[in-house]
Image (cartoon, rainbow, N blue to C red):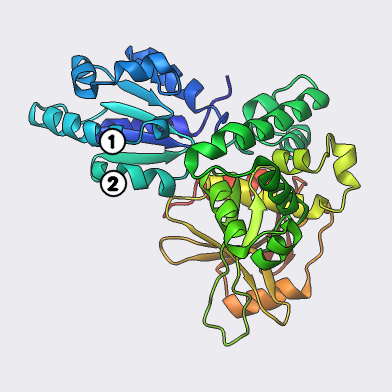
Amino acid sequence: MIARRAEKVILDALGYQAAVAVIGPRQVGKTTLAREIGDRVNAVYLDLEDSTDREKLQEPRLFLERYEDRLVILDEIHRVPNLFSDLRGIIDRGRRQGLRTGRFLVLGSASVDVLRQSSETLAGRIAYVDLGPLDILEAEPGIDALVQLWVRGGYPDSFLAQSSGTSFKLRQHFIRSYLERDVAAFGPRLPAAALERLWTMLAHSQGGILNASRLASALGTSYQTVTRYIDVLAGLLLVRRLPPLLANVRKRLVKSPKVYVRDSGLVHALLSIDDFEALSGHPVVGQSWEGFVIENLLAAAPERTLASYYRTAAGAEADLVLEFPDGRRWAIEAKRSLAPSLTKGFHNARRDLSPERSFVVYPGHERYSRTSDVEVVGLRELAAELAGVTS
């Protein structure tokens, strides 16, 4: 069992809110973590993908009010979106009886935005906790663990597989499962073959500027269809659209988002990259490292941190700009080299943005100053610093 940093956040939220929603893609360990928490407090567990458990909730209030003194875990809540209105009534009735916190732990395989469309009735009664794939702070320290996490990605089964070959096959099965079953649960039926082609194209152009028209032309479909497909992948937390920073710098700015397949292991599986040797010689290796760095840093960043990238038509660029709730700004560049150099574009971006701190993140462990105001730092060390940043 790998300790998840989200566990404390979930327990804290159960202490002050009636319902807590744990949001994350399938197979990141939501059920394992929830059942571990539930075993400590004798919780009731219902899997809403299971027809037997769904039958128990034909009369939700009649069933759930029998367990008003116990935590109830509702797994795959997005399968029964109408349940949220019943939860509201049960929570409000319990509050009148003094039962104010720790009533329900719900798990969903969709983004907060997608789930919130169904859970608006629980406003003021629910807290949201993100649980993503394993991140660098949850893996063992050391270069071997870092490389394994980068190559295999953070889905626990893939990361902990006994061999690279087994890990690769697990990720291929994961992709197939999503395409054939899970995508249909979040919207109109989408052709699996077309969606897989789009997903693979996004992996090939990892970290590229979104050009939906070009993608539509390559797929032989419409701009609107491509946009809808990307919306689905983003809603399932499989793709990230990183917005541009639209700073007032009197420069011509790139205003389209960059697109990343969020888990590096899925990038590699989509591109048939099965081990570190194959990755090292692949054209996507630099963009893969960039996406891996961004996902791990965002997993560690404080709540309400805004993430974007910065690019001008003249070539000034920063891979990641973090803006903290107190107004501080960090500029970050990802470099795969063990002896990273600074580009003119990053210098120009820093001059435009005047960040409080600037970093180059590389695969090494030594930390040193590259210039008087730019630090070269390992991913784990910067993630740990972010996790300790107070907002």
Do the residues under discs 2 and 1 have CB atoms within 8 angstroms? yes
User: In what quadrant of the picture does the C terminus appear?
Assistant: bottom left
As shown in the figure, which amino acid type bears the numbered disc 2? Answer: Glu
Q: Earlier in the sequence, mark 2 or mark 1?
A: 1
Q: Quadrant of residue 178?
A: top right
Q: CA distance from mark 2 to mark 1?
A: 8 Å
Residue 36 or residue 339, whichever sits in front? 36
Measuring from the top left, give residue 250's x and y in whole percent.
Answer: 57, 88
Q: Is residue 27 left or right of residue 9?
A: right
In this figure, which residue is indicated by the disc labeled 2?
120
Check disc 2 and report its element: helix, strand or loop. Answer: helix
Measuring from the top left, give residue 318's x and y in whole percent.
Answer: 66, 67
Q: What residue is drawn where x is 55% and y is 70%? A: 245
Check disc 1 and report its element: helix, strand or loop. Answer: helix
Q: What residue is drawn where x is 69% and y is 47%? A: 194
In this figure, which residue is indicated by the disc labeled 1?
84
Measuring from the top left, give residue 155's x and y in whole percent.
Answer: 63, 31
User: In what quadrant of the picture does the N terminus appear?
Assistant: top right
Residue 147 or residue 72, whichever sits in front? 72
Measuring from the top left, give residue 314's x and y in whole percent.
Answer: 72, 82
